[in-house]
Image (cartoon, grey):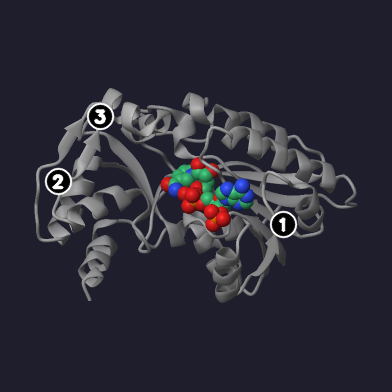
Amino acid sequence: MRVFILGGTGTIGTAIVAELVRRNHQVVALSRSEKSDKSLRVAGAVPCRGDMTEPEPWADVASTSDAVVQVAATFGDDMGDVDAKAMNALIEASQTRTEPMGLIYTGGCWLYGETGDEIAVEERPFDPLPAFSWMVNHAQMLLSAVNLRTAVIHPAMVYDMQDGGVFHRFVAAAKVGQRPEIWGSAATRWPLIESADLARAYCDLVERSDLVGHFNVVAEEGVTVSRITTVISEAFGSPEEPIIRSLDDAIAENGDWAKGPTLDQQMSARKLRSALGWQPETTDFAKPISRWIAGLGD
Ligand SMILES: NC(=O)c1ccc[n+]([C@@H]2O[C@H](COP(=O)([O-])OP(=O)(O)OC[C@H]3O[C@@H](n4cnc5c(N)ncnc54)[C@H](OP(=O)(O)O)[C@@H]3O)[C@@H](O)[C@H]2O)c1
């Protein structure tokens, strides 16, 4: 298949490109710099120069593909507006097709808000953080676009063995002998997924454009942040008590998105498992993360 990806150089996108290439798909990836061109070529993809903020040129290219994967985000105040412009251009460009095109759009676990002792499944009403509420509307718009067959993936918190992903802050602190900083409460639970397992879910859905709707992707339904920081500190051989920072402090220092990591969440991928037979290979983050950290000093 010919697959066009937005965000192919990001945490999630890098793993998706690798998996698509491994499955012998032809991958064309939006790229906005020479550095990205280079890393995409090395990964086996063809870069297509462009920016989400100016979608007209690349939206036409994307709409001639068999499928489009959207995992790009600016993470600035303009995040929702930029995504709206890009997705509207894609809908517009897809009008000229005779057959609907597959689209995998990306939401996220934070769209469910705090779940506490309940486990979020796809039927659960969304309760997004204000900074991400636009995602729910965009997903709905794409799901109802006539010439698209849209699957919306909601990844859990994504870690990887490149820079740690969502563990990056804890790893960076432990590496220089600092105490990890937890925002809110150490008892907060995070649903977790390793990036390669997540990438297999994206690729499975790319190959099954008959499957539309919302799909959670998660391997560990809810792991306490205190366990995560303990595993990371111990792997560095420096077990340290975390510093607990209040949510207000974290927001004042980092912006509104800092509320996300303080959400106590659990999430299930039951729907994806039964629809696709998808299974995560990594079901306990501790082993690969400890091995990865042990190798960092080599
Ligand atoms: N990571 C997680 O734990 C997680 C969990 C749930 C949901 N999500 C969602 O998944 C999506 C991707 O997250 P991520 O962690 O993979 O993000 P990321 O690592 O920051 O990657 C962002 C990607 O978007 C691209 N990009 C940024 N601005 C662009 C622009 N103006 N034009 C074109 N491309 C642009 C970046 O390209 P450059 O290389 O050029 O910068 C990069 O490829 C986001 O919507 C996020 O909310 C993430």
Q: Is residue 148 above or below residue 58?
A: above
In primary-sequence order, the first of circles 2 and 3 is: 2
For badge 1, the amino acid type reads Ala
Q: Determine which residue is flagged by label 1.
A: 67
Calculate the distance from the C-alpha at mark 2 to the C-alpha at mark 1.
44 Å
User: For the residue marked with disc 2, what is the amino acid?
Assistant: Arg
Q: Position of residue 246 (x, y in %)?
A: 23, 26
Number of numbered discs on residues: 3
Residue 65 in which image quadrant: bottom right
> Is residue 279 visible to us here?
no
Q: Position of residue 33 (x, y in %)?
A: 60, 61
In the image, what residue type sits under mark 3? Gly
Is 121 placed left or right of 202 in the picture? left
Return the x and y of residue 27 as percentages of the image width and height: 66, 67
Q: Residue at x 19, y 45 (%)?
A: 180
Q: Nearer the viewer, mark 2 or mark 1?
A: 2
Whether residue 230 is visible to the viewer of this picture, yes or no, is: yes
For mark 2, what is the residue? 179
Q: Is residue 185 above or below residue 97?
A: above
- The quadrant where residue 292 appears: bottom left
Going from N to C along the chain, the mark reached first, 3 or 1, is 1
- Mark 2, Cα crowd under 10 Å, few <14 / some 14-19 / many 20+, is some
* Element class at badge 1: strand
Q: Does dot 2 land on a helix, a strand or a loop?
A: loop
User: Nearer the N terminus, badge 2 or badge 1?
Assistant: 1
Q: Which residue is mark 3?
A: 184
Identify the mark at residue 82; answer none if there is no mark. Answer: none
